[in-house]
Image (cartoon, grey):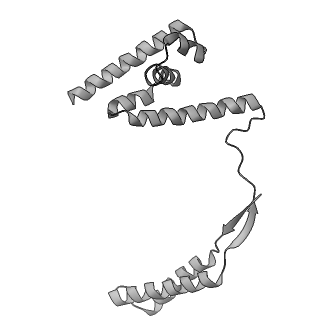
Amino acid sequence: MIEKKVRPVLPVYLFAVSWVVCGLVLPLYTLWGLVTTLAISMAVYLAATAFMQPKTILVPAPLKPFDTGEEQLDQALEQARSQLKELTALNARIPGQSISAQISRMEPDTQNIIKLRFFEELELREISQVLDMNLNTVKTKLYRGLKALKIAIREEDCT
């Protein structure tokens, strides 16, 4: 359990009530009436806020982002989350917007293959071992990803 401070809502209600009361007494269609109403309402709000301190309540602590009950699965999900953050950061470093957008639209496997091949400079065999994929699958996904990037570069050069 963690402590959380909750501000009282009564100052907001008093602020609104003061607008209604001032609207009945003062002409709000004039500038001086509007400014006076605003000043009175702000004074009421600040006074009410000063007298009513926030209430401290106990709320349940937030759960871990991934809590499946299986430690290996939780670790795999956390690793995937960190890799996604890393890939997003790498993607932001790419100068062309259409290239960056094209990489974002690719399948996660293809994104990982491109990242490992060109940013971490791994060989295709090493990539297939790291991702536990067939070597031909890695080659195919890399070829298709590079083909899509080539089209994106051509489109960017034309504009």
Q: Nearer the viewer, residue 133 or 130?
A: 130
Residue closest to the far bottom: 25
> Does residue 33 sit above or below 6 in this rendering?
below
Residue 105 in the image: x percent, y percent? 44, 28
Residue closest to the far left: 158
Residue closest to the far top: 136
Quadrant of res 10: bottom right
Residue 72 in the image: x percent, y percent? 73, 28
Residue 8 in sight: yes
Q: Quadrant of the N terminus?
A: bottom right
Question: Relative to 28, is 15 on the left or the right?
Answer: right
Residue 28 in the image: x percent, y percent? 39, 86
Residue 131 in sight: no
Tag count: 0
> Does residue 17 sit above or below 105 in this rendering?
below
> Does residue 29 sit above or below 96 in this rendering?
below
Quadrant of res 99: top left
Residue drawn at the location 67% of the way across and 29% of the way down: 76
Q: Quadrant of the C terminus?
A: top left
Quadrant of res 84: top right
Question: Relative to 43, is 145 on the left or the right?
Answer: left
Residue drawn at the location 31% of the way across and 20% of the way down: 151
Question: Relative to 83, is 143 on the left or the right?
Answer: left
> Does residue 126 sit above or below 25 in this rendering?
above
Q: Nearer the viewer, residue 37 or 59?
A: 59
Residue drawn at the location 33% of the way across and 31% of the way down: 98
Residue drawn at the location 38% of the way across and 17% of the way down: 146
